[in-house]
Amino acid sequence: CSDDHTHAARDGHDHSHAKREFPSTKLAPPSRPLHWASLNIIHTTDSHGWLLGHQKTSFPEPNYSGDFGDFASFVTHMKEIAVEKDVDLLLVDSGDLHDGTGLSDGYPAGGVDAHASNEFFKQLPYDLLAIGNHELYIYNNTLDMHVSCKVLKLFCLQALVRYNNFAPRFNGRYLSSNVNITIDGVSRPVGDRFAKFKTRKGREVTALGVLYDFTGNDKNTTVQPVADMVKEAWFAEAIKDEPDFFLLAGHMPVSKDNWPLVFNAVRAVHPLTPILILGGHTHIRDCLQLDGRSMSLESGRYMETVGWMSAELPAPKGHGSASSSSKNITFTRRYLDPNRVTYEYHTGRGNFSFDTPWGRSITKGLENLAKVFDLSFQFGTAPHDFTINQAPYPSNDSVLSLMAEAMPVAFSLNNSRASLPNIMITNSGSLRFDIYAGPFTKNDQLTASPFADSFLYIPSVPFAAANAVLPALNGAGADERRRDETVEAELWARGYVGTRYTEWLEEMYRRDVEQGGEARHAAANLSLGYVTTDACPGVGDDTPHAPLAFNNIPDFIASDAPAVADDTPIDLVFVDFIESQLIGILNSVQKDKTYTTADILSYTDVLATEVLGIYAQQAWN
Ligand SMILES: O=c1ccn([C@@H]2O[C@H](COP(=O)(O)O)[C@@H](O)[C@H]2O)c(=O)[nH]1
C-alpha cells in the first residue's frame, strides 16, 4: 500500500505510543532501492544520545524522526533480507555516544553521562564499535565504557554494580586501538585493540577502532597518535595474516585526517586486500576511495543519517575465490534519512508490518527513560525558532545571540559579582542544536547546550584588554587573517570540529544558489535536508532535498561589552572548556601582566547546561 510508505505515523495498535506518532508530516520516500552486494554494512556514528529521534515538526526535523526502536526493527528486517539474499550484513558504529540530548545528559545527580541511553545501544546487534572523543572528556564516562571482568578481577564486582558497562557486552568488538584508561595505576585499552572474526558467510575480518589525534581527554585516559599506533608491534602482528577484508572503524574523519596512515600501513603488507573504512567525528556525510579496492564512508551525526555501504567481495578464502584479484571492487554507498518511511521502503514493510516487538520495547524503554529524567519539564515557551547557521549572527533568530543574552541573566542569580562590569565568552561549538518555537523543555535545553561546563573568571582585567580577547580568539585581528594556526590546531585536537561541519553546510548552500536553487526545488517538490556531494560514484543521499539557508558564525561569542573606559577593571568570564586558549590570547593582546591559571576563579555554580533554562524561566513565561 503506497500510502503506507508516505506517512511516518504508527499503525495505532498500541495507543501508549500515540504521543510519539510524529510526525504527521508527509515525508518523501527514498528515490531508489539500496544496492545489495555480497558484503553490506549499516553504519551509525556521532549519535550523541539522539535515540528518541528528532521530534520537532519543522523541516528538516521530520526527516530524522525515526527512533532507536524503529532503527532496531529496521536492522532486524535488513538482517532477514540479508539471509534471504544469502549475503553478509554488518552493523558498525564509529563512536561519540555521549553528550547531546536529555537521554544521555539528563541523568539525576550522581549518575554517569549516557549510562542509561547506552543500555539501549547495547541491545542492538552491533558487529563492531569504535570509541569516540566524547567518551573521553570525563574519566567516569570512559570507565563506564570499559570494565572487562576478564582483566579486572577485584574491581569487577564493584564495577558491575556501579558501572554496568559497555565493552563486555560486545565481547571483544568494542575497539579502542589507540585509547587507554588507567585504573589502579595500570594503563589498559578501554575496549580491545583489534578484533578478528568471521562473518555469517565465513569471511575472515580483521578490524580496528581508531580515534583521531584527540588531546582533550581527561586525566588517566590516553590517546596515542595514529602515526605511533601504526608502528606498534601489536599492530604489525594484528594485520600480519591476510583476512578476506579489513574493517577499519574509527572516530576519525574520512577526509583530511589520518586514515591514510592506517590504510598505507595495511597496504604495505597487503597490496590488494579489500579495506572498508567507517569514519566519523566531523558530523558530515562523506565518502572517498583511497584506491579501487577500498571505500571510506562517514555517516553524519545525531541519528540524522544511517550510512549504507555495499562491496562486491569475492567468496571467502577457501571457497575457491580469486582473493588475489587486482581488479577494482564495486562499491556503493548511500546516506539514509532515519525515519519510518525510509525504513519501511527499504525493508518492503508497511506501518502494520514494520514494528518488531523488540523495536517497540526499545521505543517504550526510551520513552520511560525520558519520563524518569523528566525531559518534558517546560522552562517556558520559545517565541520563535532560534538557529545556529540558518539565521545570521548576531540576530534575533540566532541561538548564539540568545546564549550571549542569556549568560548575564542566568549568572546574575545569587552572584555578588553580578553588579560589576563584565564580558562573558563561550565557544559557539558548545551550542549544538537549534531551538524551535513552542515549549522549551529540559530536553530542548540539553540538545541546545549539552556540556556540563563551568564558568570561570579573571577579575580586574582592564576593559581594553578584555574587549580585545573575543576578536583575537576569532582571528579577526587587524590584518584580517584567519585565526592563528596554532590555536586552530589546538582546537582541532581538543575536539573542535564545528568548522568542518559548517563548511559542509555552506558548500551545499552555495552550490545550490549557484544552480538557481529555489525554482528547481519548487518544481521538484523538495523538502529541506542535507544535499551531499562527495567523491564516490553514484547517488549518495537516499532522499533528495533542498539545502537549508546558511550563515557563517564565529567560533566564539560574548555578551555585550559594558560601556566603560579602557582602563576600567572588569571581570573576564569564560567557559572552562576554552581556558587554555583564553589565557594564551589574553597574554597576547596585552603585555602589562602575564596571566596564569592562578588568576582564575570560579564565577558561578550555574553550568552551561542550565543557562538557557534559567533564561527561559525568566524571559519566556
Ligand atoms: O566540554 C565540552 C566538550 C566539547 N565541546 C564542543 O564539542 C565539540 C566537539 O564535539 P564533536 O562531537 O567531537 O564534534 C567542539 O566543537 C567543542 O567546542 C564543548 O564546547 N565543551
Image (tube, rainbow, N blue to C red):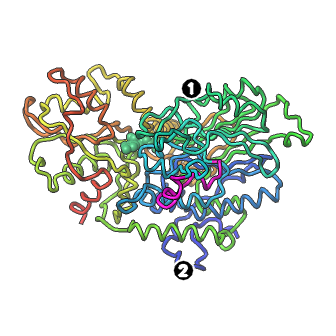
Tell me: 189 left or right of 126: left
Residue 301: percent from the left, percent from the top? 52, 48
Residue beneath label 2, please? 15
Q: Quadrant of residue 110?
A: bottom left
Residue beneath label 1, please? 228
Q: Main secondary structure of the magenta part?
A: helix
Secondary element type, mark 2: helix
Q: Quadrant of residue 428?
A: top left
- Residue located at (28% from left, 51% from top): 607
* Residue at the farthest front position: 154
Quadrant the N terminus occupies: bottom right
Quadrant the C terminus occupies: bottom left
Secondary element type, mark 1: helix
Q: Is residue 297 visible?
A: no
Distance in Å between CA atoms under marks 2 and 1: 55 Å
Q: In this view of the protein, which residue sits in the foreground, 213 or 302?
A: 213
* Residue at the farthest right position: 320
Mark 2 and mark 1 lie on one chain; the one further toward the N terminus is 2
Residue 204: percent from the left, percent from the top? 78, 42
Q: Residues within 10 Å of mark 1 (few under 14, many from 20)?
A: few
Q: Amino acid at mark 2?
A: His
Residue 522: percent from the left, percent from the top? 53, 52
Tell me: 598 left or right of 387: left
Tell whether position 161 is magenta: yes
Highlighted range, magenta: 154-173
Q: Amino acid at mark 1?
A: Asp
Q: Residues within 10 Å of mark 2 (few under 14, many from 20)?
A: few
Q: In this view of the protein, which residue sits in the foreground, 333 or 177?
A: 177
Residue contact between numbered discs 2 and 1, judged by CB atoms under 8 Å = no
Tell whether position 517 is magenta: no
Q: Is residue 8 visible?
A: yes
